[in-house]
Amino acid sequence: MKTHTAFLLCSALALGGCATQNEIAQSPAKAIVTPNSNVPAQDKLKRYYTIPNFRIGGKYDLDANPETWRNGGEGGTTLESLGSGPLQAAYIAVGTPRRNDKGEIINAIIISTFYSGDSTWMYNTWYHEQPNNGFSGGAVVGPGLTIDTDKYYVVFLDALGLWGASKPSHGLGRRFPQYNYMDMVVANYRLLRDHLNIAQVHLATGVSMGATQTWVWGVMYSKSGFVKAIMPIGGATASDGSDPVGQWTFRLAQAAIESDPNWRATNGDYYHLPKEKHPNKGMQFMWSTLQLTGLTFPVRSATPWKNLQREVFYWEPKGDETAAFIGRVQSEDAVDYWYRNNAGFNHNINDELKRIQARTLVVHVENDQWLIVENARKAAAAVPGAQIAVLSDPGAHYGVFRAPNVLKDTIGAFIEDRFTPSLPGLGGGNRGGGAAPGKPAGLAK
Amino acid sequence: MTTLRTWAGLAALATLVVGAPAMAQQPLTPRSVVAKLDGIKQTYEVPNFRIGGTYDLARPQSWHGGGEGGTTLESLGAKPARTAYIAVGTPKRNAKGEIVNAIVVNSYYSGDATAMYTNWVADQPGNAFSGGALVGKGLLFDTDRFYVVFVDALGLWGASKPSDGLGRKFPVHSYYDVVQLNYRLLRDHLKVARVVLSTGVSMGATQAYYWGLMHPEMVGAIMPIGGAPATDGEGPMAAWTFQLAKAALESDPAWVETKGNYYHLPKEKHPNKGVEFHWSVLSLTGYDLGYRQSLGWESVSKEVFSWQPDPRMGKSAGANLAGLAKIFDGVDLWYRDTMGEIHNVNALLPGMKPRTLVVHVDNDQWLIADKARDAARAIPGGQYVGLSSPIAHYAVFSALNKLRDDPTLDTFMRDIGVVADKSLVCEARNYRSPRINMAPDPAKSFWKDEMVSPFPVKYAKVKDRRGVEWEIGYMDEYCGKEENPPVLVVVHGKGAFGAHYGYLIKFAVERGYRVIAPDMPQWGTSGPGNLDKPMTRTLDDVRDAFHALIVGKLGVKQAYYHGHSLGGSTVLGYALRYPGAVRGLILEGPAGLEEYPRNIKLGDKELPLCDKSFAYDRRRWEEAYGPTGMVEAEMKRSEQSVRDFFYFKSRDPKTDVVTPSYNGYFKRDTEYARLHTDQRVAMIKGNPRELEQWVFMFIYDLYSICSEIAVDDPNSLFKQLHKIKAPIFLAFGAREPFIPGTALNGLTDLANDIINPFMRRMTAAGNAPVLKVYPGVAHFIHTDVPYEFARDTVDFMKTRQVNAFSVHTVDALINATADTDGNGGAGAKPTGLAK
């Protein structure tokens, strides 16, 4: 594939708004408003692949041979037809490929990205010796680690709609076709199969929306034998009304975006305006709404206001109010997130879970306040032979990043396929229920 | 007539009926939440009431007519400040004709007097949501005994509010204004001189804090149910939640365009969508999220907002929100939210005078329980009782019914006279709320100068049989008129002190008993005067000193003796040593009902921990106990360690993770549990000699107990117990963690190693004790269930019987319920040295 020299150059300078040479040549964008990587310092590791004539937003006939959807779902829209360049996927690969006779890789572990993230972010927190390992309670991917790069070829993936993958903020804005999770997965399948020459995925995993994609991987690609095992960590098999709290939470988030006067005035068509006239406040409002329930209430309540106020949205902030999100949304775009939220509102594969033939370990945070554990339990019950392992975390939903370390033995055994049902966390306790106190030793009083 | 319309909106309002008054000139917002009750709501105006001013609590006269610098509504061209109320019940009046038995029920965030009325007053449609009525004949708030006033709150419904017409010209007001306006209603209009209790749920609870702070001269007690001492940055989750709601309101294009000045436009052009968005943001965390999830989308979607209709959301989407937008005005809500932003009384709580019980939903997601607990802790004598509920904050309405059998609530209600007690014979006028100075002066005596005992402490000098003279601190109270009243002597446990039993003392005094509570030599107030005396002394020395005081000095020939833990051992031996002085024994989790080996194995060493041969030999004692390291460990105990241990928590020293512990003192953080905790914590920074004395005795008295009951001693206290002739009331908590002393004798079964053998033995000896086991209660029965234990003690003294079957006992026996309330759960038996 072609090398994006211009891209490498500008990413080395860690500039926001850098585009690939490809995009600049082919996109009708008036402005490139968001960078290609969530973690600028890791941007240089990211690689790209373009998929011509991929139909976005079409309908997938799951009964049909997967090869029939290799160009996207029926009735979908290609970016080319909208005057843009071809669909772009992005990834970071590490580890040790093992190949079959045909030279195809058969030991891939794929890590799909979460809602607001990309491959650089997951790499930065899960791959060994990276700056943000602490966030996950230690590295997860690396030589001898839970996901062992001596044994596996590990691919961190972007997802259609943000960062290094094709996204509305490349220029199409609200003309971008409404994608769905199946588009995300199929586009990445093309990357894995055609570009990286992967014939077998040993494990598909990911946290949060990465777990949601993992479920979709299981539904779409386990019957063919492409995906051998799935481990969704804190995802959703439905984020429409079948997931009432998740739906409510993200509906409020969407309403927050739409409440921005800049959004209202332009109906989301604002790329002709400079960034400061974009609905940035709506994005801040969205994040503040989501974060209200992001961590557990006691943890939040114990946080001093001088820290907490940085996450509280004000239309006219003073001092540090809203500061965390004012900074954050500089590299994010409201239309991108509007699409991502809307994709969630259409997502429901509950009736398709029976198609999953891969080994399945569902991991969920018991006190998750966005994606309530009960739905994960139901989803696990719908998959033949699936197990569920739960953990509690003061960070509520954010415990998903730490899960592979908290449940190291269980998850390690699942990955290595030496799984037994007596491992820690399995079956789960009750919501919020603590373990029985241990027998204190020695002189008690 | 009005048209009635029910709507299943926010849970709090779900049961309420709302109507649009069918008047010719329809006001923007209705006067009552429950239109049907509007007719019984009364209005009162306070002319020239200044709103939005400053309240200096030290100068109440300066804010009689509202805060200094405030704005009168008259000055803005509006009518005088108005509030509204519904009064029910039976006023009791003093000689001046003033009402002295009022209970005030304050209004919640979106509610008014009619809303609380329908929730709490008998035979109203809202009762179900409260788990039954609370106000009515024979109910908790008995309308035959109390005058109950439900009040509106400035800013909504029947009180003055922006939507009366001033809109954003209305002065920004505070909770001070809300409460002072209602105070004027009560004092001037209703002629109320005494408020027995000010209470309310949610924002009504928040107002209760203000009643207590602003009008201690009038208010006897407050009980905030699910309120907040602060909703500014010191109530961070409330501040965040309500700011998002406010931001939602302000995002409405109609608001943006008019900056909130829209009353000239028809209602449909008001920021109604903003009001809907506001409610949807708040409601998201109103219920426990898992519970909400279980309700399903059809129900949940009614509260989910979107700017544009979206068929994917189903037919019911936003249905409840539209109803709310019809009855609430955006500006009214904006002011109410703003009032929250300036609310913070944390710094004032240590000055709270009225008795306080904070009731809170432990899993409240708006007003987080940690702040409510902190508030109770900051208030002198303040107590906390919590409950959990799937409906989180909304459980405030039903909290009192859910907690109906809660010992803390029950005790509080009796203390403040809301629950009548006919057994009272006189008032213990000397009683005061006990207090510990949490920043003690190390140069002063901790016990004499830094603690306020519940009754005045007296001092006497008495000698034991060895001739050692001890200074004994003791309380001695009686409020009746009999010349020779029955006497109860209260003997504390190891580490404790007489004042810790203040509730029991007061209770018995007020039922006609003279109560004497001496501190043992080297403990509590009998510490400071004996710092130069030998630290080694036996329990017989204690008994002799007590006998010299009680029988010798005070001339009480015979008395009931209560003994807790170490005190239990002490009074058992006292009954053997001075049988004529003992009319009966009340044994609370007593030591002495088991035997210990003389030598105890610790690791690979065998130590003579229970060898009475060196009773007065400090050096040999040190040789025996030194290797255990117990004195040093206790000396080094940190505040955190005290708080964890006392409340059944163990903390991982590395990760700080807290897990329930088998051992601990208090299942319930009641007033006297707090006193002991405060004492132990404050002492760390107090007088160093007294701390050293306390720590030494804390370990030494393990020896005092066990050296009397060595298994190979033919004359041990244990072996003579059957000789006791005095009637016995034996009380144990079913969650007793320290008895039997597993580490010393390997026994593990309180029932079959301790209680049942003792009962058999005494029965065979012709002195069958009266027994009561308290479910869910640990070693401190008198603080876990203060009222029940005090009542049982008095019942036993009066009738030789106790009511052995509380609701908790019945529940435990029939349902085999585990210990679910209070701190910590049931765990495995420990192996450590116990009390």
Image (tube, coloured by chain):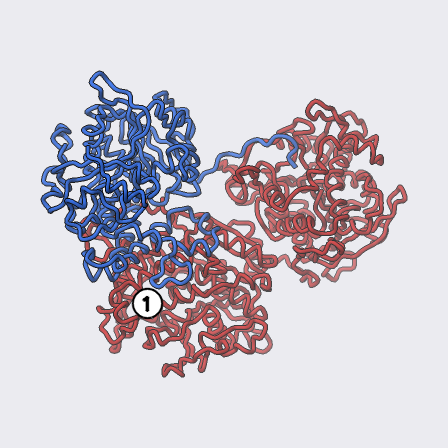
Chain colours: A blue, B red
Q: Residue furthest top?
A: A101
Q: Is residue A215 above or below residue B326?
A: above
Q: Quadrant of the C terminus of chain B?
A: top right
Q: Between A252 and B88, which is closer to the camera in this rendering?
A: A252
Q: Along the line of sight, which residue is nearer the eye, A74 or A435?
A: A74
Residue B88 x, y percent position in the rendering: 45, 68
Res. A392 image quadrant: top left
Amino acid type for the residue under numbered disc 1 = Lys
Image: B122 above or below A98? below
Within 10 angstroms of label 1, few (less than 14), some, or many (20 or more) residues?
some
Q: Quadrant of the N terminus of chain B?
A: bottom left
Picture quadrant where residue B46 is located: bottom left
Q: Which residue corresponds to the image point at 62% horizontal and 36% vertical from the top-left?
A: B737
- Work out whether residue B181 can be spotted: yes
Left or right? Give the position of B508 relative to A332. Answer: right
Return the x and y of residue B334 as percentages of the image width and height: 35, 67
Q: Chain of mark 1?
A: B
Q: Percent from the top left, x then y, of residue A200? A: 24, 24
Residue placed most toward the observer, B791 or B311: B311
Write the residue at 45% across / 66% down: B342
The answer to whether residue B798 shows anywhere in this view is: no
Could you say which quadrant of the image residue A311 lies in? bottom left
Nearest the eye: B577 or B684: B684
All told, the count of numbered labels is 1
Q: Which residue is mark 1?
A: B36
Query: Circle 1 — which element?
Result: helix
- Give how far across and how far down residue B228 sits, in percent: 47, 59
**In screen coordinates, is B472 left or right of B62?**
right
